[in-house]
Image (spheres, rainbow, N blue to C red):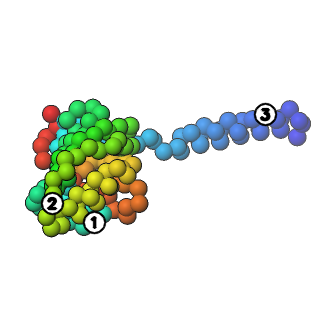
């Protein structure tokens, strides 16, 4: 086979392979539902059921802000969301005394929020995946998006 023909077939093969490779690339995942204006109640931390009372909550009242109730204390802080990535800034909270397991739950909950990495919304369920946790924080929606 002449050199010119061999070169043509080599270039054609590469072009076809490149085109097919581009077609086989997975489609980018859709951006998750925006959290702004939503309200949630904690259901579980790493698979362990949350105390029903006092309820731990998480609210995203406006872009860049998160507030809630940790079980004993109210908290607030900055939050950054980029597609499915979720990062909380330092959280400020009141310092009221807690009784029973509420203090431990609040400590675990706020600690997990500080380690948040990504989130997903599945219907009325919010999952927040945190560094070092095998299972996500699980929330149920308490109010529709505003």
Q: Name the residue tied to disc 2.
A: 98
Quadrant for the N terminus in the image: top right
Residue at 77 percent across and 39 percent down: it is 10
Q: Residues within 10 Å of mark 2 (few under 14, many from 20)?
A: few
Residue at 37 percent across and 61 percent down: it is 133
Q: Name the residue tied to disc 1.
A: 47
Disc 3 is placed on an element classified as helix
Regarding residue 128, the answer to whether it shows in the image is: no
- Which circle's residue, 2 or 3, is located before the other in the chain? 3
Residue at 22 percent across and 46 percent down: it is 93
Residue at 12 percent across and 43 percent down: it is 143
How many tags in the picture? 3
* Cβ atoms under marks 1 and 3 closer than 8 Å: no
Q: Name the residue tied to disc 3.
A: 8
- Which circle's residue, 1 or 3, is located before the other in the chain? 3
Q: Is residue 139 left or right of residue 79?
A: left
Identify which residue, 128 or 8, lies in the foreground: 128
Camera-near label (1 vs 3) is 1
Q: Residues within 10 Å of mark 3 (few under 14, many from 20)?
A: few
């Amino acid at each position: 086979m002449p050199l010119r023909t061999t070169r043509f077939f080599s270039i054609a093969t590469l072009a076809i392979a490149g085109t097919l490779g581009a077609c086989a690339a997975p489609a980018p995942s859709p951006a998750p539902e925006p959290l702004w204006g939503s309200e949630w109640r904690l259901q579980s931390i790493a698979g362990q059921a949350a105390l029903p009372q006092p309820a731990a909550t998480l609210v995203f009242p406006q872009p860049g802000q998160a507030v809630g109730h940790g079980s004993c204390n109210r908290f607030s802080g900055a939050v950054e969301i980029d597609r499915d990535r979720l990062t909380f800034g330092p959280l400020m909270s009141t310092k009221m005394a807690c009784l029973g397991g509420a203090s431990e739950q609040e400590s675990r909950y706020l600690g997990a929020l500080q380690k948040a990495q990504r989130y997903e919304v599945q219907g009325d369920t919010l999952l927040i995946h945190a560094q070092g946790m095998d299972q996500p924080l699980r929330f149920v929606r308490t109010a529709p998006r505003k």
